[in-house]
Image (cartoon, rainbow, N blue to C red):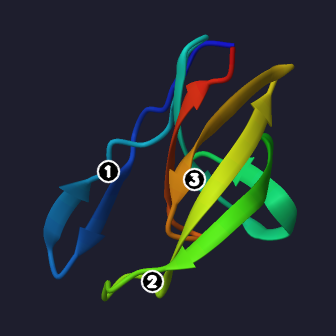
Amino acid sequence: MKYLEQDCVFVSAGQSFESGGAFVSPVYVIAYLGKDNVLTDWHGARLGTYHVTASWPINSYLSSHMNQVYARIDGITYTGRSAGEGMLFKGKRVV
């Protein structure tokens, strides 16, 4: 699956802001950890599934923990890190 999300703009106080959105290639993935172990794009559309294999405490205003994540999209497994549900996941294909 190759995927590049489009139209990730939101407006706040009259100003427009753009997110990079999700990206999927045979080697890399950028997506979001959704509820019930569903990997999503910025708009919440399902891309695949994920599971957290490890978690450790961090000092951050965004999250109290960093997670090691394995994700599966169209039969391809990726591994990477995320600060948790609703947060960005960046992964690389497992070979």
Question: Which amino acid type is shown beneath numbered disc 3?
Answer: His
Residue under numbered circle 1 = 19
Distance from Cα at disc 2 to Cα at disc 1: 20 Å
Mark found first going from the N terminus, 3 or 2: 3
Image spot of residue 19 (x, y percent): 32, 50
Q: Is residue 76 left or right of residue 20?
A: right
The residue depicted at 57 percent of the width and 69 percent of the height is: 86
The residue depicted at 43 percent of the width and 32 percent of the height is: 6
Image spot of residue 60 (x, y percent): 32, 84
The answer, for residue 45, to whether it is visible in the render is: no
Q: How many labels does the image show?
A: 3
Question: Which amino acid type is shown beneath numbered disc 1?
Answer: Ser
The residue depicted at 67 percent of the width and 31 percent of the height is: 78
Q: What element carries label 1?
A: loop
Distance from Cα at disc 3 to Cα at disc 1: 10 Å
Quarter location, residue 51: bottom right
Question: Which amino acid type is shown beneath numbered disc 2?
Answer: Ser
Residue under numbered circle 3 = 43
- Is residue 48 positioned above or below 40 on the image? above
Residue under numbered circle 2 = 63
Choose mark 2 or mark 1, whichever is in front: 2
Quarter location, residue 61: bottom left
Quarter of the rendering occupied by the C terminus: top right
Quarter location, residue 80: top right
Q: What element carries label 3?
A: loop
Image spot of residue 18 (x, y percent): 25, 51
The residue depicted at 17 percent of the width and 82 percent of the height is: 13
The answer, for residue 49, to whether it is visible in the render is: yes
